[in-house]
Each structure stands twice: as C-alpha cells, then as structure tokens.
C-alpha cells in the first residue's frame, strides 16, 4: 500500500507548479513573490530589522539586504528608527507598499474565486483549515511561526 503522504507530495509539487506559472506569466502582477511575502510579514508583525527578518524567514542577511534594498528602491518599504528605542533601524511598509500589497492580494483572491467557483463555503473553509494546519506544523518543525492576522 502506498503511503498517503506520497499523494500529498505529488499534489504539493503540482500546486508549486501552478503558483510559479501563475506569477511568472501574469502581466498585471505588480509585486515579485519575495516582495509580496516580505510586505505581508511586515504588515502583520510591524516594523522589523534585518536581523528580525533573517530570523523570521530563515535567510541570511545578504539575501534580506538585497530584498529590502529592492523593496526600498520600489518605494514599498522605508527604514525608520526602532520604535522601541533599539539601535537597529527597522523596515516599515509604506502607503504605496500597502496599496500594492492590497491590490496583489485582491487579484490573488479573485483568482482563487475563479478556481473555487463551484466550491461551497464549507468546502473552502475546510480547505483553508487544512492549509493552516499544514503550514503551522511546518512552522513548528522549523521553529519559525508565522503570525496570522
């Protein structure tokens, strides 16, 4: 008998394929995937330093420096003094960044609405619940919980 996790692995691979194709071919997409995730995290958690972002994402600071520099150049984030009085400067989402994040999120939801047009609200809620459980278990194992609004 084949383990059920083999089916999960295969479907996860296909989901990753759809997600990549979805973003790569979209002409109306205004945010790169890394910027979308960066802005989403800062929005939920508030201003964050490079060190905090590195811990949150499990990425080295050079990678985060490149991502935050690109986001700053695009006007999506700005550097501010630590609101808590610490020495490190923090990144805060700008009004333009928040607007672009909202627009991207709305386009994503519209796409999900098209895909799930024949799904009941109960099915969508159950699917969301399983995804949340899956993600929180990954976060628990990695020691990097993601704050949820």
Image: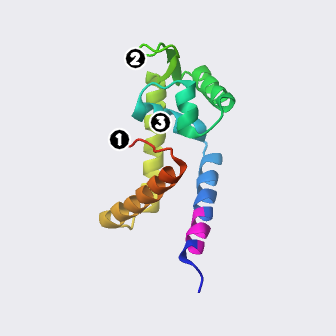
Indicate whether residue 122 is drawn in magenta.
no
Disc sitting over residue 84 in the figure: 2
Q: Earlier in the sequence, mark 1 or mark 3?
A: 3
Q: Residues within 10 Å of mark 2 (few under 14, many from 20)?
A: few
Q: Is residue 111 above or below residue 120?
A: above
Relative image position of residue 87 (x, y in whole percent): 51, 13
* Residue that numbered label 1 is attached to: 149
Asked whether, in this view, residue 98 is left or right of residue 52, the answer is left
Residue in the foreground of this view, choosing between 12 and 23: 12
Q: Categorize mark 1 by other alpha carbons within 10 Å: few (<14), some (14-19), many (20+).
A: few
Q: Which residues are magenta?
A: 6-12
Q: CA distance from mark 1 to mark 2?
A: 21 Å
Looking at the rendered image, the quarter that the N terminus falls into is bottom right
Asked if one can make out residue 29 in the rendered structure from this viewpoint, the answer is no
Determine the residue positioned at 58% across, 26% down.
71
Q: Residue at x 60, y 67 (%)?
A: 9
User: Which residue appears at 37% of the width and 67% of the height?
Assistant: 119
Judge whether 59 appears above or below 6 on screen: above
Residue identified by numbered label 3: 41
Residue at left offset 41%, top offset 32%: 45
Distance from the alpha carbon under mark 1 to that under mark 3: 10 Å
- Against 27, residue 121 (above or below) is below
Q: Position of residue 107 (x, y in %)?
A: 47, 45
Q: x%, y% of residue 131?
A: 44, 59
């Amino acid at each position: 008998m084949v383990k059920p996790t083999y089916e999960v692995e295969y479907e996860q691979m296909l989901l990753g394929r759809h997600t990549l194709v979805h973003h790569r071919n979209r002409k109306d997409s205004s945010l790169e995937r890394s910027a979308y995730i960066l802005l989403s995290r800062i929005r939920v958690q508030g201003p964050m330093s490079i060190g905090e972002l590195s811990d949150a994402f499990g990425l080295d600071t050079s990678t985060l420096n490149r991502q935050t520099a690109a986001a700053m150049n695009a006007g999506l984030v700005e550097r501010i003094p630590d609101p808590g009085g610490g020495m490190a400067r923090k990144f805060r989402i700008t009004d333009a960044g928040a607007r672009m994040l909202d627009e991207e999120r709305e386009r994503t939801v519209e796409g999900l609405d098209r895909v799930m047009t024949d799904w009941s609200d109960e099915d969508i809620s159950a699917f969301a619940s399983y995804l949340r459980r899956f993600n929180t278990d990954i976060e628990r194992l990695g020691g990097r919980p993601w704050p949820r609004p």
